[in-house]
Amino acid sequence: MKRVGIGVIGAGWWATFAHIPAVKSHPNAELVAVQSRERAKAEKIARDFGVKHACISVEEILALPEVNAVIVASTPNIHFAQAKAALESGRHVLIEKPMTFTAAEARELVELAARKKLELVISCPWHFTAHGLEARRLIQSGALGEIKMISVLMTNPIDKLLRGVNTSPTHGMADVYVEPRHGSYNDPAIAGGGQIYCQVSHAAAYLTFLTGLRAAEVFARFDRDGSQNDIYNSLTITLENGAFVSLASTAATPLAERNYEVRVFGSKAILQLELWRGTMTLVDFSDKRTEFPPLAENEIYPAQSPVLNFIDVISGKAPNGSAGDLGLASMEIIEAACESAQTGRNEQIRPVRAAAVNDSTTSPGKKTAVPASHA
């Protein structure tokens, strides 16, 4: 079988930590080219990782006939233009989160990939854990009954990164090949925003991954804590079936106390996941408790899995485990949350299905248009 030729756009911290090693480890892939804006940096990365082509532009990578898929790992402000160019040129695309700056951009990429019959993968490692896959199967099979409420607490110690105080993202990682550029995480014009774009993008996509449901309404509050970026987020989301979601997230937390707690409340059972700890428990309404085997440390956050799946999908060996539509679902929540935080209103994305509407003290807001961080 011919190997998949991969080009990496934006060969920075995360690409060199996760994506490039994943490509290099896959027997059906060849890392053909890496791109960085600085020629010397691109050449060093190419030399160190044994890559034939060192490029400084997207056009250079897309001009290479042996490249038939690209990984877009650049800063969020250029995700859309780069992914669109790659798709238009007939290349499959894996795109880092946050997918784009706006939901309209994300939707355009999803529709373009569909028209071109190309694979579009959003890089969300949580979608590939054994617990995540089993949780999705249980929920979508009806084992929990009707989903009525979800509670999410997500924390990760990157507040200094978002504040621009310390650009090191290592938080416990022993080997960092290259540090991110200043502004990549703390300049809203580059990153889109703070915690909402950088980390809630994970949790927002995970809601649709687990349930198959999209958000209908979002009410949000942000606390910037003296920063130009949001550091604390509180979101109340109504899913399209009428279920309520409470999502709290912050970047200000000690490394030893980071949390990713997901509680799914159904009419038949409750599912409890502790993603950072690798545990999952199902408790049904007869008090039967099922403890699933805990994940090994290297299974908790499988950083290379999106790229490995991307290659397998292109090779016809696996289904798309993190389709671009999940990135779109995430961007709808992010965009509506930014608008709500600015206006103080409940923002409507789509109607709640009529059969699911219960008594409510909130009224739908207007359709959201532009994230608050870009207004």
Image (spheres, rainbow, N blue to C red):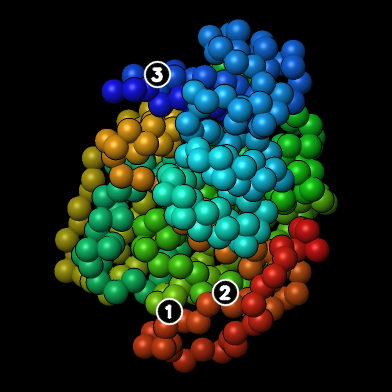
- In the image, what residue occupies the spot 66% across and 32% down? 58
Q: Secondary structure at mark 1?
A: loop
- Of discs 2 and 1, which sits in the foreground? 2
Disc 1 versus disc 3: distance between alpha carbons?
A: 44 Å
Q: In the displayed structure, would residue 360 be above or below residue 238?
A: below
Residue underneath mark 1: 242
Percent from the top left, x then y, of residue 47? 60, 7
Residue underneath mark 3: 25
- In the image, what residue occupies the spot 72% across and 51% down? 193
- Determine whether label 2 and label 1 are within 8 Å by CB: no
Sequence-wise, the earlier of marks 3 and 2 is 3
Sequence-wise, the earlier of marks 1 and 3 is 3
Residue underneath mark 2: 349
- In the image, what residue occupies the spot 38% across and 32% down? 311
Q: Amino acid at mark 3?
A: Ser
241 or 76: nearer the eye? Answer: 76
Q: Secondary structure at mark 3?
A: helix
97 or 302: nearer the eye? Answer: 97
182 or 163: nearer the eye? Answer: 182
Percent from the top left, x then y, of residue 54? 64, 16
Percent from the top left, x then y, of residue 25? 39, 18
Q: Is residue 330 visible?
A: no
Disc 3 versus disc 2: distance between alpha carbons?
A: 41 Å
